[in-house]
Amino acid sequence: QKEVEQDPGPLSVPEGAIVSLNCTYSNSAFQYFMWYRQYSRKGPELLMYTYSSGNKEDGRFTAQVDKSSKYISLFIRDSQPSDSATYLCAMRYKAAGNKLTFGGGTRVLVKP
Amino acid sequence: EPEVTQTPSHQVTQMGQEVILRCVPISNHLYFYWYRQILGQKVEFLVSFYNNEISEKSEIFDDQFSVERPDGSNFTLKIRSTKLEDSAMYFCASSEAGGLSTDTQYFGPGTRLTVL
């Protein structure tokens, strides 16, 4: 079983729709969870960071963590064509130091 | 807004040659990292560096790889004798506070390494 799994997509939505992304993980030691956005051939850009179960909101983005189910989600409201990118989840835990473990990414396409 | 920068953006080299990839982390950050992403695959951790020494490394980071902070601003990744399978995007990242719960890593735009 892979440590962190993400559906690769592509996920195609019309402009204005809610985009729903998720990751599952197998290692219950993971404590800190991040979502990055990556445009083609560019570096990952940090979107959201959370370390507790529950929801965290920032503008159009909501990150959700369910540690009991080992499941994290990212929701993008009022999606725009500029949101078209690959979304990567990443996570780490203290005993593993600062190493981030990434999911494979979900490609999102927002159609005008 | 401060950002991590990397040079060159694209490096083409022959198999067996040495390459040095350069990064300038965010200025008040103390922890530095290299990751790589082979085309179509996950971003993978290579190494982390703090206080002028390697703090962690992955199994990918073998004797062919080395890292250095030659001065107060640059952070480099050297691959001594490149192989075809080293072709990938290499990302530098930096963070302010290492393992603290609030710490987050910021990534540079990457260097695309092509080994022929």
Image (tube, coloured by chain):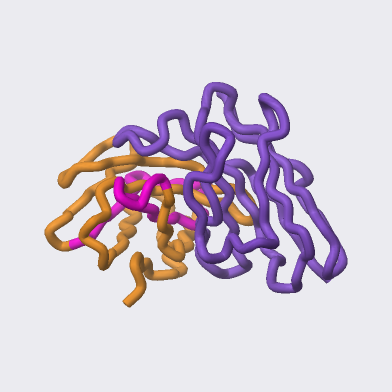
Chain colours: A orange, B purple
Could one spot residue B95 in this view of the protein?
A: yes
Q: Residue at x 32, y 33 (%)?
A: B102
What is the span of residues highlighted in magenta in the rendered image?
A70-98
A36 sits to left or right of A18: right
Q: Is residue A55 magenta?
A: no
For image coordinates 39% across by 48% down, the residue present is: A35
Residue sitting farthest toward the bottom: A1
Q: Is residue A17 visible?
A: no
Identify the residue at horizontal 53%, vertical 32% (top origin): B51
Report the label total. Answer: 0
Location of residue A100 in the rendering, given as x and y in whole percent from the top left corner: 42, 52
Is residue A78 part of the magenta span, yes or no?
yes
State the image coordinates of residue B68 (x, y, percent, origin top left): 67, 41
Q: Nearer the viewer, residue A86 or B86?
A: B86
Quarter of the figure that contains the N terminus of chain A? bottom left
Residue B79: horizontal and vertical position, in percent? 73, 57
User: What is the residue that sits farthest to the left in this orientation?
Assistant: A68
Residue at left 73%, top 42%? B22
In the image, taking residue A98 as reference, residue B42 lies left or right, namely right
Residue B48 rendering spot, x and y as whole percentages: 52, 46
Q: Nearer the viewer, residue B70 or A61?
A: B70
Q: Quadrant of residue B62?
A: bottom right
Side of B21 where B104 appears, left or right = left
